[in-house]
Amino acid sequence: MVNILVQWMMTGILALLHPFYVSVIEINHNAKDATVEVSVRIFAEDLEKTLQKYTSTKLDILKPADNAFLEKQIGTYLTRTIRLKINGQPVTLHYLGHEIQKESVWSYLEVPKTTDVKKLEIDCTLLYDFEKLQSNLIHVKARNSDKSYKLDYPKNYAAFEF
């Protein structure tokens, strides 16, 4: 019993001394609505520190003084660091908004008028300007198939064929 407790305590201490940097990007082709829906989960603290690099205005993601300004900062950052090609053609991501869930920020984007996805390419540098240990987990659903890939800094490209 004591051995298990010591192992858990050591694991907790090591986690504090060596944090991990990860985001999750979920991309889903909604054939019914002819859209590609993108959800991005990032730790709030990591996103806040990254966005702060690009503005002199003090940001607080959990309690924003100016929510419209924060939305614009998040949307601009995400559309600059996540770029998609669908069926070989670059597409424009439209930022829809974000929500806070515990210590994470879920942000939502979409690509309208997408009737079919045979190939999806992603160029993702999300949070690479914050931390060199960053990993971005990408999950894609299209044509009744699920595929995943992990991008570790500095790798930023992945392609999925369906």
Image (cartoon, grey):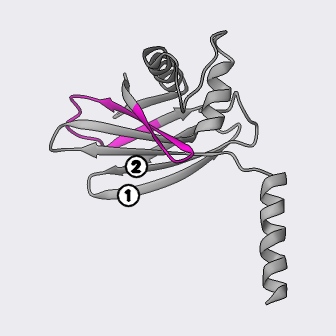
Q: How many numbered discs, if any?
A: 2
Q: Amino acid at mark 2?
A: Val
Task: Identify which residue is drawn at 54% across, 44% down.
Answer: 104
> Does the rendering let one see residue 89?
no
Q: Which mark is residue 140?
A: 2
Task: Identify which residue is drawn at 72% across, 50% down.
Answer: 20
Residue 112 highlighted magenta (yes or no): yes
Give the crowd class for mark 2: few <14, some 14-19, many >=20 residues within 10 Å. some
Q: Is residue 130 left or right of residue 97?
A: right
Q: Is residue 115 left or right of residue 42?
A: left
Q: Which mark is residue 13?
A: none
- Say above or below: 153 vs 61: below
Q: Which mark is residue 146?
A: 1
Q: Residue furthest left?
A: 32
> Does the rendering let one see residue 158?
yes
Image spot of residue 117 (x, y percent)? 29, 41
Instruction: Pick the residue in front: 56 or 110.
Output: 56
Q: CA distance from mark 2 to mark 1?
A: 6 Å
Instruction: Pick the residue in front: 161 or 139.
Output: 139
- Say above or below: 24 vs 57: below
Say which element carries label 1.
strand
The quadrant the N terminus occupies is: bottom right
Residue 126 highlighted magenta (yes or no): no
Q: Which residues are magenta?
A: 98-121
Image spot of residue 43 (x, y percent)? 59, 42
Q: Is residue 42 left or right of residue 34?
A: right
Give the crowd class for mark 1: few <14, some 14-19, many >=20 residues within 10 Å. few
Q: Is the Cβ of the residue at disc 2 closer than 8 Å to that at disc 1?
A: yes
Say which element carries label 2.
strand
Image spot of residue 59 (x, y percent)? 60, 20
Q: Amino acid at mark 1?
A: Asp
The secondary structure that most of the magenta stretch takes on is strand
